[in-house]
Structure formats: C-alpha cells, structure tokens
Image (spheres, helix red, strand yellow):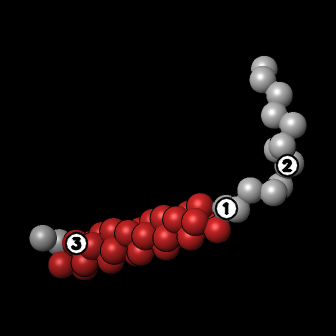
Amino acid sequence: MAENAEYKQGSMDISEHEKTFEGFVRLTIRTVFVILAILVFLALFRT
C-alpha cells in the first residue's frame, strides 16, 4: 500500500458529499411518502 506523507486523516473537505447525501435522503423520504399515498389511494378506492 502506498504511503502518502501529506495526508492527514479527517482533513478532507466533505461538504459537497454531505450535501449530496442529504439530498439523496430527502428524495428517498419523499418517494416513500408518495408510494404510501398511492397505496392508501388504491386501498380506499379499490381501483
């Protein structure tokens, strides 16, 4: 394994990664709510 003397653990800027992950989680939660709403609609109106 190559050694990199300049690298220090925890020194990397991960702000873009955190924003992307937050957006992914938000999209996933919204998608789950939409799917649940569709299932409730189908159960109520038996289409």
- Work out whether mark 1 precedes mark 3 in sequence or the reverse, and give the earlier one: 1
Point 58% across, 66% down: residue: 16
Query: CA separation, marks 1 and 3?
Result: 42 Å
Label 2 residue SS: loop
Amino acid under disc 3: Leu
Residue 32 visible here: yes
Query: Of tags 3 and 2, which is closer to the observer?
Result: 2
Looking at the image, which residue is at 22% across and 72% down? 42
Mark 2 sits on what residue? Answer: 9
**Position of residue 40 in the picture relative to residue 46 (left or right):** right
Query: Disc number at residue 42?
Result: 3
Q: Amino acid at mark 1?
A: Ile
- Picture quarter with the C terminus: bottom left
For mark 3, does the 10 Å Cα neighbourhood hold few (<14), some (14 to 19), or many (20 or more) residues?
A: few
Q: Could you tell me the amino acid type at mark 2? A: Gln
Q: CA distance from mark 2 to mark 1?
A: 12 Å
At x 83%, y 28%, the residue is: 3
The disc placed on residue 28 is none
Q: Is the Cβ of the residue at disc 3 closer than 8 Å to that at disc 2?
A: no
Decide if residue 19 is on the left or right side of residue 42: right
- Say which quadrant the N terminus sits in: top right
43 in relation to 2, above or below: below
Numbered disc 1: secondary structure: loop
Q: Residue at x 59, y 61 (%)?
A: 17
Q: Which residue is mark 1?
A: 14
Dot 1, crowdedness within 10 Å: few (<14), some or many (≥20)? Answer: few
Relative vertical location of residue 9 with respect to residue 13 in this rendering, above or below: above
